[in-house]
Image (cartoon, rainbow, N blue to C red):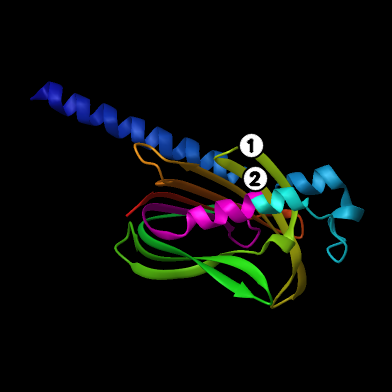
Amino acid sequence: MLGFFKVIKFISVVIMVGFVSTSTSLASLCGKESDELLRLGEDKYYDAENPSRIADEDKKIREKIYKSMQGKWRGTYTYSYCAGHDNSRIELETAKVESEISERIRSGKVNLKIKSQAEFNDGVTKILEHETIQGIGHATHFELVSDKEIKFIERYRGSRNDGAVLLEKAYTIKMDNKNSSNINILKIHVTGYTNGFFAYDRKWDLARK
């Protein structure tokens, strides 16, 4: 019996160390400059009215991937963001989710809407509809990592209570078709930046229902 409690104590310590390590690494993101800002430089980065555009061939690839992402999914959702009076403290929320990804056409452009019913670890259940993957025309950078992974960046003007801001979303989308002819594993990672600095991080780790 004593050995059992030693094992439980060891597992608890490992979990706590892992949590502290993760929190510390996430906290280091607060105040971090966008990689895109560093790549382009301030003049090009903040010129959202005349951004560079992705090639037509890349648009076709992304459209194909968009179609394969549509449908109903379940899995986990993680949301981390900087909080506190100086935005130096990281807040982390996790939830089990039932998600639906659907196509929306606005002004002739195709968007993907992610709607999720989320059950958070504190027992609170919410409907999340805040993530829209914008149409092809919004992308300013595109990278085809493989036939099942893409990375792209959206950068555009937005607004909040204290005035106009420049918003950036850096996406990584990974897919797999384990034991199936269709895509049935989906990972979506979105990092958001406001005026070139880290604002939040969202991750969906999903399997098709």
- Please give the count of numbered marks on the rendered protein: 2
Q: Tell me where residue 38 appears, x and y as whole percent.
A: 81, 44
User: Circle 1 sits in a helix, a strand or a loop, which is it?
Assistant: strand
Q: Residue at x 35, y 30 (%)?
A: 14
Range covered by the magenta-colored residues:
61-89
Q: Which residue is mark 1?
A: 145
Residue in the foreground of this view, choosing between 19 and 113: 113
Q: Quadrant of the N terminus?
A: top left
Question: Which one is earlier in the sequence, the residue at label 1 or at label 2?
Answer: 1
**Is residue 154 part of the magenta span, yes or no?**
no
Measure the C-alpha gap from mark 1 to mark 2: 7 Å
**Is residue 63 part of the magenta span, yes or no?**
yes
Please identify the quarter of the rendering in which residue 147 is found: top right
Q: Tell me where residue 120 appears, x and y as whole percent.
A: 35, 60
In this view, the residue farthest toward the front is 181
Residue type indicated by callout 1 = Val
Q: Residue at x 76, y 53 (%)?
A: 56
Residue in the foreground of this view, choosing between 115 and 160: 115
Residue type indicated by callout 2 = Lys
Q: Which residue is mark 2?
A: 151
**In contact (CB < 8 Å): disc 1 and disc 2:** yes
